[in-house]
Amino acid sequence: MSVLSVPLVLNLDGVHLTDEQFYQLCVSNPEIPFERNSQGALIVMSPVGGGSGNRELEFGIDLGNWNRQTQLGKVFSSSTLFKLPGGGDRSPDAAWVELSRWQALTPTQRQKFPPIAPDFVMELRSRTDSLEMLQQKMQEYLDSGVRLGWLFNPQDQQVEIYRQGEAKEVRPLPTELSGELVLPGFRLVIDRFDDD
């Protein structure tokens, strides 16, 4: 299989995959990371390089460490695909769901693609990601009920903060991010991104 340099978007005009068909497509092709946007287009995600993969994991570790101390919810990796209420099936680079909302799902719902919008998401732009596509994805998260989202943009040395009912905030780096009321007490200090 050749490596994609950018995400591939397949518009399935006239073809509608049911949730079960989409699930089976993903399960039958575990080496291909699929997403679906709220319009039903199939997105084949490209792999990330070492720098992006390292940053993604480091940010996820920070979120996981905070959650271990507070035990307020569940943390998810970029391999988790969420069936969003707005119609998309998306995999944030890191996500968090408040505990009572997670526990309200059935065991079957937890085992498949959880039909829930995370309370918090992180996305990290890699060299192959279109900023516009990621911004659309962040808006899709908000439209589905995500309360707080951070989009890290190393190419422009900034972070975009997305909040329910508010305009996007763009901050230059370095900066300190707060989990606000969604992730109480969570802080993340971001210096400038390296060029790797």
Image (cartoon, grey):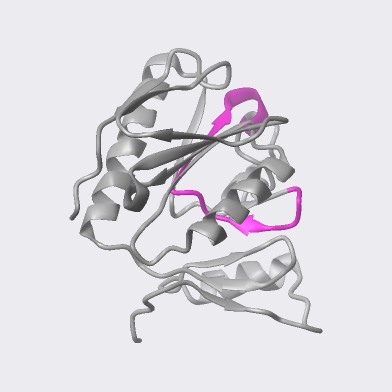
Give the magenta range: 85-102
Q: In this rendering, would 91 be left or right of 129? A: right
Q: Residue at x 68, y 58 (%)?
A: 88
Q: In this rendering, would 12 be left or right of 122? A: right
Whether residue 11 is situated above or below residue 84 in the rendered picture: below
Whether residue 195 is situated above or below residue 179 in the rendered picture: below
**In the image, residue 147 lies at what x, y percent?**
64, 31
Which quarter of the figure has residue 21? Answer: bottom right
Q: Residue at x 38, y 67 (%)?
A: 128
Location of the N terminus by quadrant is: bottom left
Q: Nearer the viewer, residue 81 or 139?
A: 139
Location of the C terminus by quadrant is: bottom left
Instruction: Report whether residue 112 is seen.
Output: no
**In the image, residue 171 lies at what x, y percent?**
43, 33
In the rendered structure, does residue 187 fall within the stretch colored magenta? Answer: no
Looking at the image, how many numbered discs can be counted on the residues? 0
Instruction: Report whether residue 18 is seen.
Output: yes
Q: In this rendering, would 163 be left or right of 74? A: right
Whether residue 36 is situated above or below residue 184 in the rendered picture: below
Q: Residue at x 76, y 51 (%)?
A: 86
In the rendered structure, does residue 88 fall within the stretch colored magenta? Answer: yes
Q: Residue at x 32, y 34 (%)?
A: 173
**In the image, residue 143 lies at what x, y percent?**
73, 44
Q: Nearer the viewer, residue 195 or 149?
A: 195
Which quarter of the figure has residue 192? Answer: top left
Whether residue 173 is situated above or below residue 77 in the rendered picture: above
**In the image, residue 14 lies at what x, y percent?**
81, 84
Q: Looking at this view, name the residue that lies furthest to the right.
A: 14
